[in-house]
């Protein structure tokens, strides 16, 4: 009994120590950030003064050298060499017309990190990305340099989720949804080697729904295909309907054999409105829609989702055929199908 109590006390002490360490570490981070903010604010004002007095390397060199000497007498521990003073002007000129969020981000960085970013000739989006990562992940200047060498911004842009979850879902749910849904799915398990229409693609997915569920990821439960939604005397059908257990919401998937088109978003928005009105259960979250296309243009997707109130994502899929070859075959097949249909009518 005594041993058990001792173990409990030790366990509680471990938690207390952990919490105390975390509090001190966070306090030190906060102090460091405040120091950075103060230092950068001072450099900003000096840079602004040099800029407004129209001092440059041709006409202001002697003034800046003299200023450096006199400032060192007042602040011997401060880096105020002529080169640093010119860097301060460069810092002000670079960001004086930038958005507030960019200014807030770079103000939290160390001066060394700021100088490195200034040397890279980045645009505001790149600056904001790397500055935000430095603050969020506690990167040193060396880690920042490595991240730039690895082109993390470019890779992040390529892997950026094509959805509006951040704008339409609560913060925690939006993050989870971004993890649950991908931007590309591999449907190679269908064994498709010749063109198919959308209903045939759907049929094949239903036949191999277990493999499709594995590809979708954990948490998905299949409800059905061609799920009918009747409202106001009209019937609509969702290609495939799932329920996600962790997200606690219905997930509608609309299959498209060609490339993404903006009008697909409006159609999905309508499906989600029906699902939320007719089938969303008590305690469940808003329904989510995924438009699954053979290919997509990321710019078209972003513009189409702008201002849409329902959570919608757009993903593409890969089959055994190369995507470009498959798209051409599918386009030819659809064109032929439409021509036959027109002649029949």
Image (spheres, helix red, strand yellow):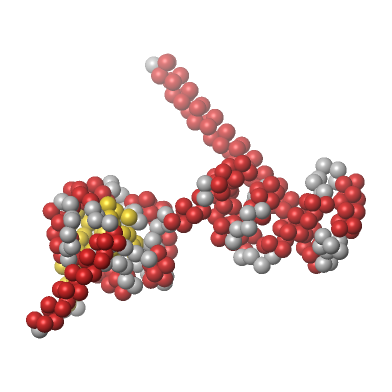
> What residue do we see at 31% from left, 68% from top?
260
> What residue do we see at 90% from left, 46% from top?
73
Q: Quadrant of the C terminus?
A: bottom left
How far from the left and from the top, in percent, is residue 278? 22, 67
How far from the left and from the top, in percent, is residue 94? 68, 62
- Tell me: residue 14, above or below residue 190: above
Work out whether residue 142 or residue 242 is closer to the camera in this orientation and state it.
Answer: 142
- Report the label total: 0
Residue 149 lies left or right of residue 88; in this view the side is: left
Residue 303 lies left or right of residue 340; in this view the side is: right
Q: In the figure, residue 193 lies in which quadrant?
A: bottom left
Q: In the figure, residue 17 lies in which quadrant?
A: top right
How far from the left and from the top, in percent, is residue 147? 55, 46
Residue 313 visible to the viewer = yes
Q: Quadrant of the N terminus?
A: top left
Residue farthest top in this picture: 2
Work out whether residue 204 or residue 271 is closer to the camera in this orientation and state it.
Answer: 204
How far from the left and from the top, in percent, is residue 85? 80, 54
Q: In the figure, residue 318 lies in which quadrant?
A: bottom left
> What residue do we see at 32% from left, 59% from top?
315
Residue 136 visible to the viewer = no
Residue 18 lies left or right of residue 77; in this view the side is: left
> What residue do we see at 51% from left, 26% from top?
13
């Amino acid at each position: 009994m005594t041993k058990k109590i001792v173990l409990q006390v030790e366990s509680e002490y471990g938690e207390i120590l952990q919490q105390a360490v975390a509090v001190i570490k966070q306090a030190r981070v906060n102090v460091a950030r405040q120091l950075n903010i103060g230092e950068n604010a001072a450099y900003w004002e000096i840079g602004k003064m040099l800029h407004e007095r129209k001092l440059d390397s041709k006409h202001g060199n002697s003034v800046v050298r003299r200023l450096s000497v006199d400032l060192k007498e007042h602040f011997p521990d401060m880096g105020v060499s002529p080169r640093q003073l010119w860097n301060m002007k460069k810092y002000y000129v670079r960001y004086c017309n930038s958005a507030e969020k960019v200014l807030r981000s770079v103000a939290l960085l160390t001066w060394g990190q700021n100088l490195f970013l200034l040397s890279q000739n980045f645009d505001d989006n790149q600056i904001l990305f790397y500055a935000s990562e430095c603050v969020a992940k506690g990167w040193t200047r060396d880690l920042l340099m490595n991240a730039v060498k690895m082109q993390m911004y470019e890779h992040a842009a390529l892997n950026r989720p094509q959805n509006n979850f951040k704008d339409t879902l609560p913060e925690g749910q939006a993050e989870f949804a971004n993890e649950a849904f991908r931007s590309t799915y591999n449907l190679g398990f269908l064994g498709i080697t010749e063109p198919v229409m959308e209903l045939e693609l759907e049929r094949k997915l239903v036949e191999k729904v277990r493999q499709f569920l594995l590809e979708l990821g954990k948490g998905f439960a299949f409800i059905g295909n061609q799920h009918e939604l009747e409202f106001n005397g009209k019937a609509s059908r969702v290609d495939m309907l799932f329920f996600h257990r962790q997200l606690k919401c219905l997930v509608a998937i609309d299959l498209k054999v060609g490339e993404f088109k903006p009008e697909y978003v409006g159609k999905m928005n309508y499906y989600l409105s029906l699902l939320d009105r007719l089938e969303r259960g008590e305690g469940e979250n808003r329904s989510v829609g995924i438009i699954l296309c053979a290919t997509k243009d990321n710019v078209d997707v972003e513009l189409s989702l702008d201002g849409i109130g329902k959570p919608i994502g757009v993903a593409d899929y890969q089959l055994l055929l190369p995507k470009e070859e498959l798209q051409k075959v599918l386009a030819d097949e659809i064109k032929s199908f439409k021509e036959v249909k027109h002649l029949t009518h």
